[in-house]
Image (cartoon, grey):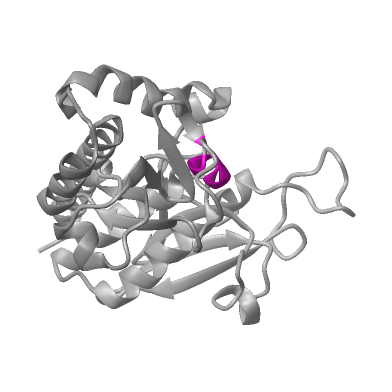
Amino acid sequence: MVAVAIAEEAKSRGLDPMLVLVHNADDEDTIMMGDYDLYHVAVTIGDNYYDDRGEISRDELNFDDFGEEDRDYYVDEFFLNEKVKDAIKRNTNWDKCPTDFKERALEILDNDEDELTPNQKEFPERYGNCGMLALALIEEGIKRKIPGIEIVFVTATDEDEFLEADEPEIHHVAMWFKGKYYDDRGEISEDQLGDFSPLGLTSPKDAKPKEGRDYIVLAYEMENNKDLKLATDIVKNNTDWWKSCEEYTQRAEDFWEKVNNETPT
């Protein structure tokens, strides 16, 4: 029930939690409808695992030596829904409801923010969530059928490798529209895109990051939800985000309303 409480709280924040079941069932039908040994239930959000102990490693799912994975027990992930919650209730000796653990869920999820750097706490959309803000702006623009929107990656990865690289190095993410760049600061210059880039090994220590030396700027047009999905995967897999696009929905709506009002008719 603790895991369900964590998952429900994470989902309410716009995150994508998955319930992790450690069990000995033979197939998914048995997991959903049958009786079996359910050794443990946890949650995964992105690459991180959580249970009542807080954030844990994947190895810690086997906290009581259940044996060897894929021989003595299995680990499977499922979306949070009533069917999975019923399976958990049927195969665990629960005596409390998820609502009883809401406070603990809040503590666990909020603890991640306690570990943020001062810059991340003061400017979360510049140090970690810049990509999520850009995606929110782009998603709202696509909904409004606005053409000519581009997502902008400030990176040290070559253009030929960026889309195929397992872990492209991303320094910052912004949006381009009608010749202007936008991020948390509002409209910015092209030079300001590199403000958050680290200096290269051969750059003078007191120099300002320079395009072509310390970083390059790559832009990709976002025409539809397919393009948005590709960009979202890149951002989620390669930036230190902890807020969701949904948390920036109102900000995105306000942005496009302002743009619309400033556009001559």
Is residue 158 depicted above or below 104 in this figure?
below
Relative to 47, is 184 on the left or the right? Answer: left
Is residue 29 depicted above or below 238 in this figure?
below
Q: Is residue 59 magenta?
A: yes
Tell me where residue 153 appears, x and y as whole percent. Answer: 52, 62
Tell me where residue 46 appears, x and y as whole percent. Answer: 43, 50
Relative to 253, is 127 on the left or the right? Answer: right
Q: Nearer the viewer, residue 202 or 226?
A: 226
Tell me where residue 68 appears, x and y as whole percent. Answer: 56, 55
Is residue 88 depicted above or below 119 in this figure?
below
Identify the residue shown where x is 38% and y is 62%.
232
The total number of labels drawn is 0
Can you name the residue that lies furthest to the bottom here?
160
Q: Quadrant of residue 157?
A: bottom right
Identify the residue shown where x is 53% and y is 27%.
116
Q: Is residue 53 magenta?
A: no
Q: Quadrant of residue 125?
A: top left
What's drawn in magenta, residue-wise? 56-62
Tell me where residue 144 appears, x and y as whole percent. Answer: 13, 65
Q: Quadrant of the N terminus?
A: top left
Q: Quadrant of residue 101?
A: top left
Q: Quadrant of the C terminus?
A: bottom left
Identify the residue shown where x is 13% and y is 51%.
261
Q: Nearer the viewer, residue 191 or 175?
A: 175
